[in-house]
Image (cartoon, helix red, strand yellow):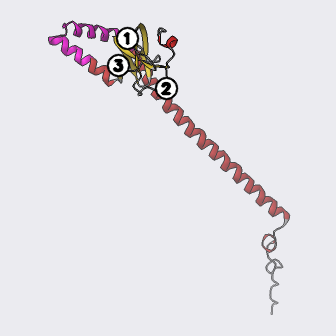
Amino acid sequence: MSEPAPEPATANASPAGESAPGPAAALAAAELAAQVAERTADLQRLTAEYANYRRRVERDREAAGVNARVQLVSDLLTVLDDLDRAGAHGDLVGPFKAVADKLIAAVGKLGLESFGLVGEPFDPAQHEAVQHEESAATGPTVTVLSAVLRPGYRIADRVLRPAMVSVVDRADDGLAEPGGPHHRGSDPAESTGSA
Protein backbone atom coordinates (compact mmCIF):
# COMPACT_ATOMS: atom_id res chain seq x y z
CA MET A 1 0.00 0.00 0.00
CA SER A 2 1.30 3.14 -0.92
CA GLU A 3 1.40 6.20 1.14
CA PRO A 4 -0.52 9.23 0.06
CA ALA A 5 1.59 11.78 -1.72
CA PRO A 6 2.45 14.77 0.37
CA GLU A 7 0.80 18.01 -0.67
CA PRO A 8 3.07 20.76 -1.81
CA ALA A 9 3.79 23.36 0.83
CA THR A 10 2.87 26.21 -1.44
CA ALA A 11 -0.68 25.02 -1.90
CA ASN A 12 -1.77 26.18 1.54
CA ALA A 13 0.16 29.48 1.51
CA SER A 14 -1.27 32.49 -0.31
CA PRO A 15 0.83 34.39 -2.83
CA ALA A 16 2.92 37.14 -1.34
CA GLY A 17 1.10 39.94 -3.23
CA GLU A 18 -2.38 38.93 -2.00
CA SER A 19 -1.94 38.90 1.73
CA ALA A 20 -0.52 42.35 2.33
CA PRO A 21 1.01 44.65 -0.24
CA GLY A 22 4.59 45.30 0.57
CA PRO A 23 6.48 48.52 0.06
CA ALA A 24 7.74 47.30 -3.32
CA ALA A 25 4.17 46.85 -4.62
CA ALA A 26 3.12 50.30 -3.41
CA LEU A 27 6.17 51.80 -5.07
CA ALA A 28 5.36 50.01 -8.35
CA ALA A 29 1.75 51.24 -8.21
CA ALA A 30 2.89 54.83 -7.62
CA GLU A 31 5.33 54.50 -10.49
CA LEU A 32 2.58 53.26 -12.79
CA ALA A 33 0.26 56.08 -11.72
CA ALA A 34 3.01 58.63 -12.42
CA GLN A 35 3.57 57.12 -15.88
CA VAL A 36 -0.16 57.21 -16.63
CA ALA A 37 -0.34 60.86 -15.53
CA GLU A 38 2.70 61.71 -17.65
CA ARG A 39 1.26 59.95 -20.71
CA THR A 40 -2.10 61.66 -20.19
CA ALA A 41 -0.42 65.08 -20.00
CA ASP A 42 1.58 64.27 -23.16
CA LEU A 43 -1.60 63.24 -24.96
CA GLN A 44 -3.44 66.40 -23.88
CA ARG A 45 -0.51 68.58 -24.99
CA LEU A 46 -0.34 66.85 -28.39
CA THR A 47 -4.10 67.19 -28.83
CA ALA A 48 -3.92 70.92 -28.07
CA GLU A 49 -0.93 71.38 -30.40
CA TYR A 50 -2.79 69.60 -33.20
CA ALA A 51 -5.92 71.73 -32.67
CA ASN A 52 -3.78 74.89 -32.77
CA TYR A 53 -2.04 73.63 -35.91
CA ARG A 54 -5.39 73.01 -37.64
CA ARG A 55 -6.63 76.50 -36.72
CA ARG A 56 -3.39 78.09 -37.92
CA VAL A 57 -3.49 76.19 -41.22
CA GLU A 58 -7.13 77.18 -41.78
CA ARG A 59 -6.35 80.84 -40.98
CA ASP A 60 -3.33 80.76 -43.32
CA ARG A 61 -5.43 79.15 -46.06
CA GLU A 62 -8.07 81.88 -45.75
CA ALA A 63 -5.39 84.59 -45.75
CA ALA A 64 -3.79 83.09 -48.86
CA GLY A 65 -7.19 83.10 -50.60
CA VAL A 66 -7.81 86.74 -49.68
CA ASN A 67 -4.27 87.67 -50.80
CA ALA A 68 -4.81 86.00 -54.17
CA ARG A 69 -8.14 87.80 -54.66
CA VAL A 70 -6.58 91.11 -53.61
CA GLN A 71 -3.73 90.68 -56.09
CA LEU A 72 -6.07 89.85 -58.97
CA VAL A 73 -8.58 92.59 -58.26
CA SER A 74 -5.90 95.23 -57.55
CA ASP A 75 -4.69 94.84 -61.12
CA LEU A 76 -8.24 95.46 -62.38
CA LEU A 77 -8.94 98.69 -60.45
CA THR A 78 -7.79 100.92 -63.31
CA VAL A 79 -10.08 98.98 -65.68
CA LEU A 80 -12.99 99.55 -63.29
CA ASP A 81 -12.11 103.28 -63.18
CA ASP A 82 -12.19 103.39 -66.98
CA LEU A 83 -15.58 101.66 -66.99
CA ASP A 84 -16.92 104.20 -64.47
CA ARG A 85 -15.72 107.10 -66.62
CA ALA A 86 -17.15 105.51 -69.79
CA GLY A 87 -20.50 105.06 -68.03
CA ALA A 88 -20.45 108.67 -66.84
CA HIS A 89 -19.91 109.87 -70.43
CA GLY A 90 -22.58 107.60 -71.90
CA ASP A 91 -20.10 105.42 -73.78
CA LEU A 92 -21.17 102.17 -72.08
CA VAL A 93 -23.72 100.86 -74.58
CA GLY A 94 -24.43 97.63 -76.43
CA PRO A 95 -22.00 94.74 -76.18
CA PHE A 96 -19.43 96.88 -74.38
CA LYS A 97 -21.94 97.45 -71.57
CA ALA A 98 -22.66 93.70 -71.38
CA VAL A 99 -18.94 92.94 -71.00
CA ALA A 100 -18.57 95.70 -68.40
CA ASP A 101 -21.52 94.35 -66.41
CA LYS A 102 -20.05 90.83 -66.47
CA LEU A 103 -16.65 92.10 -65.32
CA ILE A 104 -18.20 94.11 -62.48
CA ALA A 105 -20.28 91.07 -61.44
CA ALA A 106 -17.18 88.84 -61.53
CA VAL A 107 -15.13 91.10 -59.26
CA GLY A 108 -18.17 91.45 -57.00
CA LYS A 109 -18.23 87.66 -56.59
CA LEU A 110 -14.59 87.86 -55.52
CA GLY A 111 -15.70 90.12 -52.66
CA LEU A 112 -14.83 93.55 -54.08
CA GLU A 113 -16.90 96.38 -52.60
CA SER A 114 -16.74 100.03 -53.54
CA PHE A 115 -17.20 102.72 -50.90
CA GLY A 116 -17.28 106.46 -50.59
CA LEU A 117 -20.70 108.11 -50.82
CA VAL A 118 -21.46 111.82 -50.62
CA GLY A 119 -22.68 112.69 -47.13
CA GLU A 120 -21.05 109.85 -45.23
CA PRO A 121 -18.66 110.76 -42.40
CA PHE A 122 -15.01 111.19 -43.29
CA ASP A 123 -12.79 108.33 -42.09
CA PRO A 124 -9.04 108.81 -42.71
CA ALA A 125 -8.57 105.02 -42.74
CA GLN A 126 -10.85 104.73 -45.79
CA HIS A 127 -10.84 108.16 -47.44
CA GLU A 128 -8.11 110.32 -48.91
CA ALA A 129 -9.19 113.95 -48.59
CA VAL A 130 -7.68 116.07 -51.36
CA GLN A 131 -9.83 119.15 -50.81
CA HIS A 132 -11.47 120.74 -47.75
CA GLU A 133 -14.31 123.10 -48.56
CA GLU A 134 -15.19 126.02 -46.29
CA SER A 135 -18.42 125.86 -44.34
CA ALA A 136 -20.59 128.40 -42.53
CA ALA A 137 -21.36 125.84 -39.79
CA THR A 138 -20.80 127.02 -36.24
CA GLY A 139 -20.51 125.07 -33.03
CA PRO A 140 -19.65 121.39 -33.05
CA THR A 141 -19.19 120.12 -36.58
CA VAL A 142 -18.66 116.80 -38.29
CA THR A 143 -16.55 116.32 -41.42
CA VAL A 144 -18.44 114.60 -44.24
CA LEU A 145 -17.76 113.79 -47.86
CA SER A 146 -18.95 116.53 -50.19
CA ALA A 147 -17.73 114.90 -53.43
CA VAL A 148 -16.23 111.55 -54.39
CA LEU A 149 -13.51 112.08 -56.98
CA ARG A 150 -12.54 108.41 -57.19
CA PRO A 151 -14.30 105.52 -55.41
CA GLY A 152 -12.46 103.41 -52.88
CA TYR A 153 -12.39 99.62 -52.94
CA ARG A 154 -12.02 96.90 -50.32
CA ILE A 155 -12.13 93.14 -50.04
CA ALA A 156 -13.27 91.81 -46.68
CA ASP A 157 -11.71 94.18 -44.12
CA ARG A 158 -8.75 95.10 -46.35
CA VAL A 159 -8.81 98.50 -48.08
CA LEU A 160 -7.31 98.12 -51.56
CA ARG A 161 -7.52 101.78 -52.39
CA PRO A 162 -8.90 104.66 -50.31
CA ALA A 163 -11.62 106.80 -51.84
CA MET A 164 -10.31 110.15 -53.10
CA VAL A 165 -12.75 112.71 -51.73
CA SER A 166 -13.52 116.32 -51.05
CA VAL A 167 -14.77 117.09 -47.53
CA VAL A 168 -16.76 119.80 -45.80
CA ASP A 169 -17.63 120.54 -42.17
CA ARG A 170 -21.33 120.56 -41.36
CA ALA A 171 -23.21 121.12 -38.14
CA ASP A 172 -23.19 118.03 -35.97
CA ASP A 173 -26.58 116.31 -36.04
CA GLY A 174 -25.64 114.06 -33.13
CA LEU A 175 -25.07 110.94 -35.23
CA ALA A 176 -21.27 111.23 -35.29
CA GLU A 177 -19.19 109.73 -32.51
CA PRO A 178 -17.90 112.46 -30.19
CA GLY A 179 -14.13 112.65 -30.38
CA GLY A 180 -14.06 110.45 -33.48
CA PRO A 181 -11.80 111.22 -36.44
CA HIS A 182 -14.48 113.32 -38.18
CA HIS A 183 -15.96 115.09 -35.14
CA ARG A 184 -14.78 118.59 -34.33
CA GLY A 185 -15.45 120.63 -31.21
CA SER A 186 -16.66 124.22 -31.06
CA ASP A 187 -13.11 125.62 -31.20
CA PRO A 188 -13.02 127.84 -34.32
CA ALA A 189 -9.33 127.09 -34.86
CA GLU A 190 -10.18 123.39 -35.20
CA SER A 191 -12.84 123.87 -37.85
CA THR A 192 -10.64 125.97 -40.15
CA GLY A 193 -7.83 123.39 -40.52
CA SER A 194 -7.52 121.35 -43.68
CA ALA A 195 -7.90 117.57 -43.90
Q: Name the front one of labels 2 and 3.
A: 2
Tag 2–tag 1 contact (CB < 8 Å): no
Q: Residue at x 60, y 39 (%)?
A: 49
Q: CA distance from mark 2 to mark 1?
A: 38 Å
43 left or right of 86?
right
Q: In the picture shown, does residue 32 fall above or below 55?
A: below
Q: Residue furthest front?
A: 138
* Residue behind mark 2: 178
Q: Is residue 80 magenta?
A: yes
**For the residues carrying marks 1 and 3, which lies nearer the camera in this image?**
3
Callout 3 crowding tier (Cα within 10 Å): few <14, some 14–19, many ≥20 = some
Q: Which residues are magenta?
A: 74-103
- Determine which residue is flagged by label 3: 119
Along the polypeptide, which appears first: circle 1 or circle 3?
A: 1
Please say whether residue 72 is visible from this viewpoint.
no
Q: Amino acid at mark 2?
A: Pro
Q: Hey, which quadrant is residue 50 in on the image?
A: top right
Count the numbered circles shown.
3
Q: Amino acid at mark 3?
A: Gly
Residue 44: % across, % down? 63, 46
Q: Secondary structure at mark 2?
A: loop
Please give the residue where the numbered disc 1 appears in the rendered image: 75
* Near-viewer residue (146 or 102): 146
Relative to residue 155, is residue 94 depicted above or below?
above
Q: Position of residue 133 (x, y in %)?
A: 39, 8
Q: Dot 2: within a 10 Å radius of its alpha carbon, few (fewer than 14), some, or many (20 or more) residues?
A: some
* Residue shown at the point (35%, 19%) measured from the top left: 119
